Image (cartoon, rainbow, N blue to C red):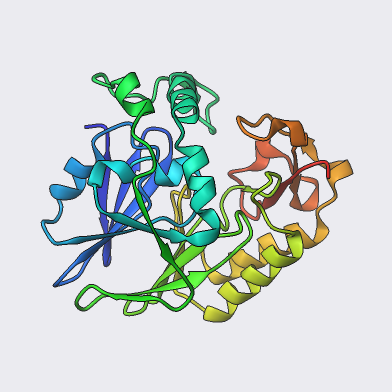
Amino acid sequence: MYYQVEKFDGYYRIGSPEAVFCYLITGSKKAMLIDTGYCYGNLKETVASLTDLPLVIVNTHGHCDHTGGNAQFGIPCYIHEQDMKLCREHNSPKVRASNAERAKHSVHYETGEEYNALPEDFDEEAYSQMGCGILQPVSEGMVFDLGGATMEMLETPGHTRGCISVLYREKNILFIGDITGMFVWMFAPETTSLNVYIQTLEKLYALNADAYIGGHNPDAMHREDLLLYKRAAEEADYEKGEPFESFMAQECEPRVCALDGKTLKDMFTPGFAAVVLGKN
């Protein structure tokens, strides 16, 4: 199967070959899907194999690798108002076609090996025309009661202006999208200042969640990990950064600014954290 499903305490993680994770939480009355990935495969079918409950979809932010499957479901997808335009831009036919072409030449971060991430029955033309789905605004403090699973929306700007994190109150775990990761992109036009990002990290730290679960991290992060990203943002020096090849906003001349002089070769070592900055 194209999607790999793993069951954890209180949620399912749905992974795909291009290293993107979506999360499904099931209550007694409803289910919530957090992010829809690039969606080169049939995500709707995969979700239906796990639950037949009425579904609520939340996008942590508007980037294509978190909203690409919205349109498969035909229901409203909740996203922060500040990221709606970004979501539409990232799901234009041109961008979707470009994503699919790039997926044919995906590179494994750890091994450097190239591979085709697309499923065998992939329909490139249909995919490029899918669009962004039905968008509906979500904001700080909105709560979705799934039945024994209470999901609270938190505004956590940084990576984009409209980033949302989702707190699963009963389990005290927080789904944070791309607020932290192996390295956080902070160079595109839709990102905030580093000061705003630092304030978000302080907000997440104060919540003292048991786990912070990201859109690309194979392992859950913990409270103390947030301090690494805070320090990376505070100490970031563009002039000392490592040039970074990006598929978007390359005109910003992005550079990886990692803690303690590390480089991307150290990405999977303990204590690695980095922000990617643009020239301006």
- For image coordinates 41% across by 46% down, the residue present is 67
Q: Quadrant of the N terminus?
A: top left
Q: Position of residue 78 (x, y in %)?
A: 38, 60
- As displayed, is residue 46 above or below residue 197? above
* Quarter-of-image position of residue 127: top left
Q: Residue at x 52, y 67 (%)?
A: 222
Q: Is residue 191 left or right of residue 221?
A: right
User: Picture coordinates of residue 207 (x, y %)?
Assistant: 52, 79
**How many numbered badges does the structure rendering display?**
0
182 left or right, relative to 66 = right
Left or right of 54 in this view: 277: right
Q: Is residue 163 visible?
A: no
Residue closest to the eye, 15 or 56: 56
Between 145 and 117, the residue placed more toward the observer is 145
Residue 101 in the image, given as x and y percentages of width and height: 46, 20
Q: Quarter of the image for the C terminus: give it.
A: top right
Residue 64: horizontal and vertical position, in percent? 47, 40
Residue 114 vs residue 74, the one in the foreground: 74
Side of 63 where 150 appears, left or right: left
- In this rendering, does residue 47 appear at all? yes
- Observer-nearest of 21 and 273: 21
Which residue is most to the right?
239
